[in-house]
Image (cartoon, coloured by chain):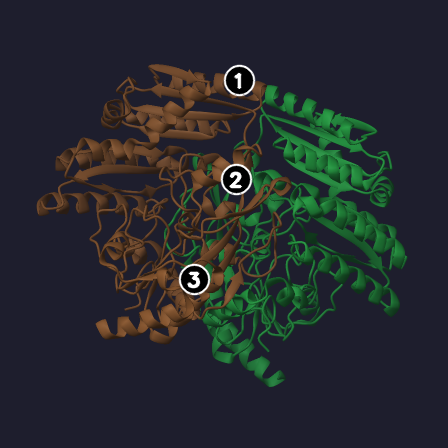
Chain colours: A green, B brown
Amino acid sequence: MTNSIEIITDALKKVLKDDQVTVNTTVRELHGRDESYHAQQLPDIVVFPESTQDVSNIMIVSKSHQIPVIPFGLGSSLEGHVIPLKGGITIDFSLMNQILEVKENDFLVTVQPGVTRTQLNQRLKKHGLFFSVDPGADATLGGMAATNASGTTSVKYGVMRDQVRDLEVVMADGTIIHTGNLAAKSASGYHLNGLFVGSEGTLGCFTELTLLVHGIPEHITAARASFPTVNDAVEAVVSILQAGIPIARVELVDEPSMKQTNIYSETNYIEKPTLFLEFHGNEAGLKSDVDFTTMIVADHHCEGIEFETDNAGRNRLWEARHNLAYAFIHGYPGKKMMVTDVCLPISELAGAVEYAREIVHELGLIGGIVGHVGDGNFHVLLMMDMSDSEERAKADDLNERIVLYALERGGTCTGEHGVGIGKQKYQEREHGAALLVMEKIKKALDPDNLLNPNKIVKLD
Amino acid sequence: MTNSIEIITDALKKVLKDDQVTVNTTVRELHGRDESYHAQQLPDIVVFPESTQDVSNIMIVSKSHQIPVIPFGLGSSLEGHVIPLKGGITIDFSLMNQILEVKENDFLVTVQPGVTRTQLNQRLKKHGLFFSVDPGADATLGGMAATNASGTTSVKYGVMRDQVRDLEVVMADGTIIHTGNLAAKSASGYHLNGLFVGSEGTLGCFTELTLLVHGIPEHITAARASFPTVNDAVEAVVSILQAGIPIARVELVDEPSMKQTNIYSETNYIEKPTLFLEFHGNEAGLKSDVDFTTMIVADHHCEGIEFETDNAGRNRLWEARHNLAYAFIHGYPGKKMMVTDVCLPISELAGAVEYAREIVHELGLIGGIVGHVGDGNFHVLLMMDMSDSEERAKADDLNERIVLYALERGGTCTGEHGVGIGKQKYQEREHGAALLVMEKIKKALDPDNLLNPNKIVKLD
């Protein structure tokens, strides 16, 4: 293998500059893990393309030497997506981080895959625009498209797939394609945009993305509403949605999570099951939505609702919410975080959250529950001692029971984190005969199984 | 061929009841055309399945006898999608027309493919819900999913693809799959929902659809705004969108179309380029949106805006808009309608409409322009004498020049009508190397090229 890696490295250096190719162990180690609990595995080579043509050349080397390639953004994935299960060449997109064009009048931007969402939002601000998908981590947009990321604002603005108007993709044989166009809608050809978004590097490498952006709303109000029980909070959300209130964010944070937030973010929020809410709109409409919501939460035993209308208060609130995972990690040094990620029809959500809480309690695990409850998506954040095999087994058991509960009720094993390594084993259970259709597509587009092999579909 | 058709008919009658299979010429003629100008071609056999299992059995007969199958809803397609280019078995879904379930709390319905959109909306009304996609024609939901239909409300609620949560699909080999689940979002597996929606019967037959529905808005206001020029009207729309007003419908109707509307619908609307608008929301927010819009249209030389707040006035307005195609057809007996259907980035729309008007004028053709201008999508409705080859050539020339104009500016050759027969020749130009990817997918899922062959991708 060492010998062949040398040959492949030489081949790569023929099409890239020397400093774009490395076998340095430290660099490989950095590319052998993500933010998940999954075990590290090292790529053989790491490359840093500067252009689409570089990526195409890398693919041709990969094909001719039959060595896997794994695209890598910032490594903030949560299910081991970027871990090279069979070694190979990791393609790090950090040098392809330019915002290529802002088409203000069309609400479109074109970016390279290494651009991060905060980098993009900083640039968009002066145009009165923002990019809506907000998974918490400052991920790259290429990575977010690869995993169909979503987050707190998806209940109003949709997930990553809804924002992608066009992708430039390098295919397994080095061919460069465009999956879409710049029009707001199209009925032409197969919907490749949708197919490639969420494909986790298994069908091609994204080298350019054209994304929909939105006007910064005229008025924004955020709120925190406390409830006696998680169930009351979840049922309040169902009522808000049924009332047709166009809520922009609605997040559930349970008591253990509120406690951890107060410690880490130095807030003094009430330590009860809480909804973090946000409303976007014109002044009059927003006031009406806020009043209606206040009435609805009162019907569900809300013990207090507090509003944040100025920028500083709103930012503090959402920062506290976003830092929640870090709050747990910080609070339990030496432990690793495992996050569950099911999504269910909204009518099944309250039962699912209740069920998850019971298991956490029954198994004596440490963790909190947070959720993008407007979408029916929730997470159990579990802090685990990775060396304690009993604790790991319990965490796996919890994850599995939560997944099976969701699948039995028309839900999905992953609402937003993706399949990666952790959810591979549930693909057959979730998709049934459709998994064979996915395998046929994979084989048709990557016949040698070189693109992030054994993610999503397992071919060997 | 006659002999083999007899054998195949016998094979079909072994798996279906006798009256579900016919070779009657009148029935075949009804299934040999749609609402487009494309030439009729007859299927050899027409079948009427009553269940998913029937469809699966039909597919197995199709495969074993290597005869094409073409799914058929109501024949309201506009580009010849249902015309059997190579003969074969047309599968008419009119007996599969049940609304199977309304999951009110989840905003979901499950229907069979033969259900029409007005049938569904009638049922949903009592739940305070509505199905948003409105292409004008009372198409079947199976057909609308097959063509990724859209229409007047897409600017707010999205296209057909955005409403599909799950499809039951019978594949070429008779296998039955589900493409999605009931959750609001998912990052699990490849996005088969998106791939199958808009696949025009070339990848599989839909036998059940689970669709997103919406709450009927608290308040609705419609309006008509007249402008001195089409350009003023289009630029007003761009400004409305840029102001972030969440407009629910915004339709352009030019002078010739307004004239035809007044004749056919017995209205007395001002015969000037007009925007038909609709706003949905809570009372206060809607009032604010309407006031802001009134200011914006005034800036673009609006010569008068009239509001319709009661049901009757609104219905009259949208009925007049929807009947526009029939108004032209009625006004020119003996002629056939050809409809162009490009969609462009909104910044290119005014130029595109202007360009199309110039060509219509230059070629001396009869027709009007209407458009879902909020999406950047517009149609030229042309009335043609099909026996006049010179007129046909002119119409083809117009269509092609409009398509090429759109493609050169990042647009698409079809915004909502689909590829069918009419837009097949532009697929390579629009998709480039991506068309090869589409061909690979088609070959992987339908290796014998039996599903609506030579639509979207042309394999022989």
Give amino acid for label 3: Gly
Secondary structure beneath dot 3 equals loop
Q: Nearer the viewer, mark 2 or mark 1?
A: 1
Residue B358's quadrant in the figure? top left
Instruction: Estimate the x, y position of residue A197 in percent, counting from the top left.
Output: 53, 55
Instruction: Estimate the x, y position of residue B426 in percent, counting from the top left.
Output: 28, 54
> Is residue A426 left or right of A181 when viewed as pictured?
right
Label placed on residue B287: 1
Mark 2 — residue?
A213
Q: Are marks 3 and 2 on the same chain?
A: no
Q: Earlier in the sequence, mark 1 or mark 3?
A: 3
Report the residue at 30% width, 27% height from top. B231
| Residue A121, above or below A387 | above
**Chain at tag 2:** A
Residue most toward the right?
A364
Mark 3 — residue?
B204
> Is residue A36 left or right of B300 when viewed as pictured?
right
| Residue B152, above or below B35 | above
Q: How busy is the neighbourhood of tag 3: few (under 14 within 10 Å), some, or many (20 plus)?
A: many
Instruction: Estimate the x, y position of residue A132 in percent, counting from the top left.
Output: 59, 40
Distance from label 2 to label 1 (Cα)?
Answer: 26 Å
